[in-house]
Image (cartoon, rainbow, N blue to C red):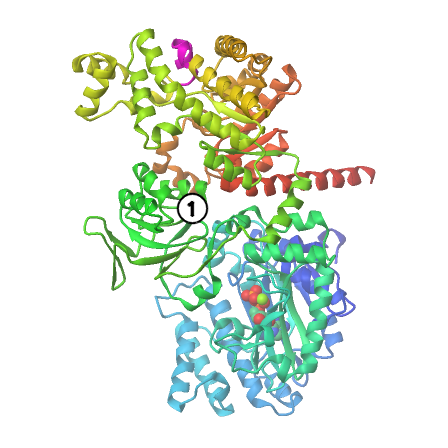
């Protein structure tokens, strides 16, 4: 071979001959890399070789033909495998059989193809029969499996043939097998006799010829070539492509092909095959967990055609407890497997998912990979392995995905109860946790239940913002329509409320108050149970378990805080939310909005606000503001108290004015009377408040500029509340006053003058030497971000209001993106919904610039974010990278943000270390 064409496409694995190892995952795929690693560890891995993912890419580039050099390298590798296996591929006396297995960088379970028993043909069958001591039954069982898999994977799928519904070749052959079993009155495949199998193989081949118009290849070499090509092609199979879309796996990775010597679990009653997890993947319990089948081949266990047997005592459950465990049946081999389990865990320092086969009591390892797990299991395993000294603290912190934490923070349905119950309908898992309650059909009823302390599930066709109080009051929400970003979903996730949306198979009649699921009709008051983490709905009341008592979680979060650099605060509008936020570990409040009191159902502050809005003279306005003052002060005081000296960022009023104008005549007359004006005058003023573009209208700081008395009232409320804490409670109190919707430093200068004046007045009145406060601004208009250097001359802190900043940077209305966002995501125009994950390129660029420019002016400028994205792990990572001081998010997301912050810190530390190491080299 010429040197220039010597791209290495083929890597051997097997006892004493592995070319690769686990670190070569990208080139060899997960399966290939781990087979090599296991062989290196001295585990019994049937020898074989891996054709690289790079080769797959070249195969497609080469018009779906083998790239130069591959055939020769395969031949050489096969010869070496033959040598160690002491068999020969295609040999008539001592034939070697192989499997051709797919395996990408990232596990894509069941999405690509594998062909077993490759190499069985008229010429090799007699040799194999002889070698197995005349075991014809086994040989023909292997042969019929080859025919079934090969015709499906190589002759149909890889050729791009799309058979009509129900006519796929695999389906036809399966039906033939079933018919034969039915005719003969057999229960399982193992009842088939040699004669049955021989006939089946013959009939299969006839059918294949008829349907696919080609002979089933009877030449071992042709079979191998066909199988390798088919595995490559399965990378672009329908299933694989749609899976990649969902999981965000790039199309250009390609799959590796593993050609591996066959070992047989279907050689009789001392042969078997199984799959196992080194620990329980559902609970994380340190128990070997698995299933096995006697006299079977690999795919039988997962295919579900036979009920798998339990591996051991620990794995027995209601369905399989009468079946024999491997521990009982093959104690010696089981012990060996346990030894391998321990060795693997100590080597990989993680929970693994393994596949094994036993050929006549001899154990072989066929696969291992890091196992998928639930959030609960991830947490428990991380903490257990830390204790077992299998991993260090940083690794433990990295082991739980922030999104998995979510599931641990809410009450959940009892797992046992769920197992015993039947899922009556499924929807999208929009809000995590479990909820059990009586069905109600509207907000009023939900609130009525809440008042009576009755748990309820609000069932709606879909929710809209008007339902918000009912949603707050309900224990769980179920809707027929809506997606993961629908109103209900967003709101519920923010609150950490259990919610299932888009359960298309339910029929809700909000007038008659009935819910139909299938043939069953539920009425108001009937009980329903929801698993919002999975989107499952159950009839009746299932048991729930509370998460707050989770000791492992408490310990884990302590560890998390040890590594994080970024502060985590909460967005909280009430003292109640503030207390919750502290319980979840918030280090302050990043956004406190006084507007909350106007939505809370208390008519008095709302009335005062309306009066203020409809005032036309400073005199009228001051009167209204004086009425409003005690409510504002009371709210602020309660929150400051709840935070006990931790920083609280109070955002100044930014109400959508026109929304607050009352609509009923009665209310209008009331208000007019209270202001002392006629109804006609009232209507005139209300009309004047109408804006054609309220988002960009008379709001935020603009209100404070035009009506300084509004700013003064709020400053007074804050300083009076602070005074009370300092004088009465003798406690410190730190307030950060935040001016919203600014675009120029002069706006801040103007507002600061008012605030400073009020501070001096209140200090003098209350005999306080000095208040501990800062005045800063929300950066939510692009111009403010651009002028950050100048803004920081006035502002003592920045808080990026990334909801509005995103809205104004993109020019996307947050409330109207529903019409196009899905298309934008599907067509890959933008990588993610920018209202959920910070847009690094645009909005992120602006944040980075603003932090740098701001700190050039004011060295220690505090900077945080308070938008929705503050609790989203990828955005938190970004905030860490740009050096923000803190993120602020809803209370339930505080632990998630803490974990994301710790992981970001650990990641950048590791990256820095790697960079230093690379430099030294
Ligand atoms: P998947 O990635 O879908 O799990 P695999 O390549 O792991 O596909 O193969 C499917 C099944 O076939 C597995 O259960 C595996 O154990 C079995 N299998 C694969 N190769 C061999 C082999 N060389 N000998 C015996 N069984 C095998
Ligand atoms: Mg597998
Ligand atoms: Mg805003």
Give above or below for 478 relative to 272.
above
Which residue is outermost to the right? 920
Report if residue 251 is visible in the image.
no
Q: Is residue 27 left or right of residue 2?
A: left
Q: Is residue 161 left or right of residue 347?
A: left
Question: Where's residue 921, x and y in %?
Answer: 82, 40
Question: Where's residue 563, x and y in %?
Answer: 68, 40
Give above or below for 152 relative to 234.
below
Question: Secondary structure of the magenta portion, mostly?
Answer: helix
Residue behind mark 1? 497
Q: Quadrant of the N terminus?
A: bottom right
- Number of labels in the image equals 1
Instruction: Kindly identify the residue that appears in the image at 42 percent across and 13 percent down.
Output: 704
Q: Residues within 10 Å of mark 1 (few under 14, many from 20)?
A: many
Question: Where's residue 591, x and y in %?
Answer: 49, 28
Q: Which residues are magenta?
A: 700-710
Question: Which image quadrant is residue 388 in?
Answer: bottom right
Q: Nearer the viewer, residue 845 or 333?
A: 333
Question: Where's residue 14, x and y in %?
Answer: 73, 69
Q: Is residue 780 left or right of residue 608?
A: right
Instruction: Kindly identify the residue that appears in the image at 45 percent across and 50 percent down.
Output: 432
| Disc 1 element | loop
Instruction: Kindly identify the residue that appears in the image at 63 percent across and 51 percent down.
Output: 399
Q: In terms of image quarters, where does ligand 3 lie?
A: top left
Give above or below for 409 relative to 647.
below
């Amino acid at each position: 071979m010429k040197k220039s064409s010597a791209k290495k496409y083929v890597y051997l694995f097997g006892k004493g001959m592995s070319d690769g190892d686990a670190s070569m995952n990208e080139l060899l795929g997960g399966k290939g890399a781990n087979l090599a690693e296991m062989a290196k560890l001295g585990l019994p891995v049937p020898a074989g070789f891996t054709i690289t993912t790079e080769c797959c890419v070249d195969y497609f580039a080469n018009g779906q033909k083998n790239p130069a050099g591959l055939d020769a390298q395969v031949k050489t590798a096969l010869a070496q495998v033959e040598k160690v296996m002491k068999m020969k591929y295609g040999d008539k006396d001592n034939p070697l059989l192989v499997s051709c297995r797919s395996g990408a960088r990232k596990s894509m379970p069941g999405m690509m193809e594998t062909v077993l028993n490759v190499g069985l043909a008229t010429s090799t069958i007699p040799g194999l029969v002889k070698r197995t001591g005349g075991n014809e039954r086994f040989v023909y069982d292997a042969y019929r499996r080859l025919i079934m898999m090969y015709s499906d994977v190589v002759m149909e799928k890889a050729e791009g043939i799309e058979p009509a519904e129900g006519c796929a070749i695999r389906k036809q052959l399966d039906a033939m097998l079933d018919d034969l079993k039915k005719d003969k009155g057999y229960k399982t495949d193992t009842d088939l006799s040699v004669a049955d199998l021989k006939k089946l193989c013959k009939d299969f081949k006839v059918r294949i010829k008829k349907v696919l118009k080609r002979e089933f290849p009877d030449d071992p070499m042709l079979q191998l070539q066909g199988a390798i090509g088919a595995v490559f092609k399965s990378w672009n199979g329908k299933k694989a492509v749609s899976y990649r879309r969902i999981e965000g796996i790039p199309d250009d990775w390609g799959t590796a092909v593993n050609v591996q010597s066959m070992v047989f679990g279907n050689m009789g009653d001392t042969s078997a095959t199984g799959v196992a997890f080194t620990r329980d993947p559902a609970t994380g319990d340190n128990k070997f967990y698995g299933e096995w089948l006697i006299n079977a081949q690999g795919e039988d266990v997962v295919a579900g055609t036979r009920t798998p047997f339990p591996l051991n005592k620990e794995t027995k459950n209601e369905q399989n407890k009468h079946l024999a465990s491997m521990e009982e049946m093959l104690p010696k081999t089981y012990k060996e497997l346990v030894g391998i389990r321990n060795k693997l865990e100590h080597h990989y320092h993680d929970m693994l998912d393994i596949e094994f086969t036993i050929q006549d009591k001899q154990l072989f390892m066929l696969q291992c990979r890091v196992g998928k797990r639930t959030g609960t299991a991830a947490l428990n395993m991380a903490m257990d392995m830390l204790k077992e000294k299998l991993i260090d603290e940083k690794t433990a912190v990295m082991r739980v995905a922030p999104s998995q934490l979510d599931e641990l923070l809410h009450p959940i349905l009892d797992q046992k109860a769920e197992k015993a119950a039947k899922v009556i309908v499924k929807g999208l898992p929009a809000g995590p946790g479990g909820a059990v309650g009586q069905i109600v059909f509207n907000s009023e009823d939900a609130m009525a239940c809440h008042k009576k302390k009755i748990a309820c599930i609000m069932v709606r066709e879909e929710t809209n913002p008007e339902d918000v109080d009912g949603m707050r009051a309900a224990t769980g929400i179920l809707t027929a329509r809506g997606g993961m970003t629908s109103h209900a979903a967003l709101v519920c996730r923010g609150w950490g409320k259990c919610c299932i949306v888009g359960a298309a198979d339910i029929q809700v009649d909000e007038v008659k108050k009935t819910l139909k699921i299938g043939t069953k009709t539920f009425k108001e008051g009937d009980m329903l149970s929801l698993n919002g983490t999975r989107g499952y709905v159950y009839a009746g009341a299932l048991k729930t378990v509370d998460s707050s008592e989770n000791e492992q979680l408490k310990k884990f979060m302590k560890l998390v805080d040890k590594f994080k650099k970024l502060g985590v605060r909460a967005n909280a509008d009430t003292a109640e939310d503030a207390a919750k936020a502290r319980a979840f570990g918030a280090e302050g409040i990043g956004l406190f909005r006084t507007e909350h009191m106007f939505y809370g159902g208390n008519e008095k502050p709302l009335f005062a606000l309306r009066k203020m809005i409809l005032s036309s003279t400073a005199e009228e306005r001051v009167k209204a503001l004086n009425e409003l003052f005690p409510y504002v002060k009371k709210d602020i005081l309660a929150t400051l108290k709840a935070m006990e000296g931790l920083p609280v960022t109070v955002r100044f009023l930014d109400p959508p004015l026109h929304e607050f104008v009352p609509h009923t005549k009665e209310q209008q007359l009331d208000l007019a009377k209270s202001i002392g004006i006629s109804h006609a005058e009232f209507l005139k003023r209300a009309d004047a408040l109408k804006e054609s573009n309220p988002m960009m209208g008379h709001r935020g700081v603009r209100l404070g500029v035009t009506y300084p008395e509004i700013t003064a009232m709020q400053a007074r409320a804050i300083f009076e509340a602070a005074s009370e804490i300092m004088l009465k409670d003798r406690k410190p109190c730190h307030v950060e006053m935040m001016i919203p919707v600014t675009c120029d430093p002069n706006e801040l200068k103007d507002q600061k003058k008012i605030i400073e004046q009020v501070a001096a007045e209140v200090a003098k009145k209350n005999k306080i030497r000095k208040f501990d406060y800062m005045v800063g601004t929300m950066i939510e208009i692009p111009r403010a971000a651009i002028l950050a250097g100048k803004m920081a001359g006035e502002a003592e802190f920045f808080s990026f209001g990334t909801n509005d900043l995103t809205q104004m940077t993109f020019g996307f209305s947050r409330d109207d993106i529903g019409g196009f966002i899905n298309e934008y995501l599907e067509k890959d125009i933008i990588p993610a919904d920018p209202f959920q994950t910070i847009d690094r390129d645009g909005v992120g660029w602006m944040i980075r610039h603003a932090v740098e420019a701001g700190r050039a002016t004011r060295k220690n400028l505090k900077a945080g974010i308070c938008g929705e994205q503050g609790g989203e792990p990828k955005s938190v990572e970004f905030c860490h990278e740009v050096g923000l001081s803190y993120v602020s998010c809803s209370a339930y997301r505080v632990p998630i943000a803490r974990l994301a912050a710790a992981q970001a810190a650990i990641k950048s530390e590791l990256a820095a270390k790697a960079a230093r190491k690379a430099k030294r080299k």
